């Protein structure tokens, strides 16, 4: 059994500090960035290079690694072995995300060397100019939910990197008429995505209901981008034109208009 319940709310042993003037950016790194049919060292290295270049411009990052296909394969195998307990299946997936996180750390010179399980350590690690990296934390919570919670805690921006260009009106894998939604508010995010969540272990979706709820309740600025186009990712971070979806509060959208 994991010790995440004890560690998640553990008192911070380091002093709290103010984050940089630019808001910290919490990136939910889809498991497919790390591995699709096989481990993808090339994409991980390119992603690390993008993060490193952006950090030189003053941006601060926190990374959360997903489980991807590897986690789903482990869950499927566990089910064939007779495991039907969703809590246990989630624990298996969390272990995979933490292994993915540890591998992702190796792509960075300035990443904190251990996979973190205590959110309250973030400020001290950022102060030391290191990149905090997480995997999953609690059964029932996706790594997207972990990343959204961290963005809420730090007052940061949430970026989801996956194998999809953004949020569509319907699933583009099943509909030829699907179209990308470039901008939306949090209420529309809830309407489009939250109703599709079954909470099954390892379920593959763009954003789950719990994540949408956290993003909505704190009106966290959110980007949904394709992991394959890292120039596009850099453009979004810098405030340039990009392909994807941005989710902002209604007031922010009205200001842009």
Image (cartoon, rainbow, N blue to C red):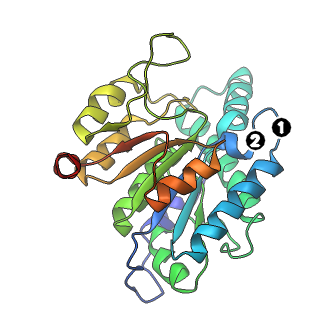
- In the rendered view, does 202 fall on the left or right side of 146? right
Give residue 17's quadrant in the image: bottom left
For residue 16, above or below residue 41: below
Q: CA distance from mark 2 to mark 1?
A: 5 Å
Looking at the picture, tell me which residue is in the foreground, 73 or 133. Answer: 133
For residue 225, above or below residue 147: above
In the image, residue 14 lies at what x, y percent?
A: 47, 87
Secondary structure beneath dot 1 equals: loop
| Residue 39 seen in render | yes
In the image, residue 149 lies at what x, y percent?
A: 39, 56
State the residue position of label 2.
Answer: 35
In the image, residue 154 lies at what x, y percent?
A: 38, 69
Residue 38: give its label. Answer: 1
| Residue 5 seen in render | no
- In the rendered view, does 101 fall on the left or right side of 106? left
- What residue is rendered at 42% in x and 18% in y? 170
Label 2 close to label 1 by CB (< 8 Å): yes
Secondary structure beneath dot 2 equals: loop
Q: Residues within 10 Å of mark 1 (few under 14, many from 20)?
A: few
Q: How many marks?
A: 2
- What residue is rendered at 37% in x and 83% in y? 18
- What residue is rendered at 38% in x and 36% in y? 182
């Amino acid at each position: 059994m994991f010790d995440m319940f004890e560690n998640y709310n553990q008192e911070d042993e380091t002093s709290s500090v103010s984050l940089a003037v630019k808001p910290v950016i919490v990136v939910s790194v889809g498991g497919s960035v790390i591995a699709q049919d096989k481990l993808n060292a090339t994409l991980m290295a390119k992603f690390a290079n993008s993060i490193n270049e952006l950090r030189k411009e003053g941006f601060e990052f926190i990374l959360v690694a997903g489980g991807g296909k590897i986690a789903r394969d482990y869950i499927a195998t566990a089910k064939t072995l007779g495991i039907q307990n969703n809590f246990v299946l989630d624990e298996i997936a969390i272990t995979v995300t933490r292994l993915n996180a540890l591998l992702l750390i190796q792509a960075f010179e300035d990443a904190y060397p251990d996979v973190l399980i205590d959110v309250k350590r973030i400020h001290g690690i950022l102060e030391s100019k290191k990149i905090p990296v997480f995997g999953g934390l609690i059964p029932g919570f996706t790594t997207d939910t972990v990343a959204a919670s961290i963005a809420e805690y730090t007052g940061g921006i949430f970026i989801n990197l996956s194998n999809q260009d953004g949020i569509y009106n319907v699933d583009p894998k099943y509909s030829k008429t699907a179209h990308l939604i470039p901008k939306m508010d949090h209420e529309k995010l809830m309407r489009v995505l939250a109703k599709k969540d079954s909470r099954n272990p390892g379920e593959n979706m763009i954003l789950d209901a719990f994540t949408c709820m956290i993003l909505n309740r704190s009106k966290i600025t959110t980007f949904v981008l394709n992991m394959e186009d890292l120039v596009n990712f850099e453009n979004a971070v810098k405030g340039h034109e990009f392909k994807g979806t941005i989710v902002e509060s209604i007031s922010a959208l009205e200001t842009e208009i």
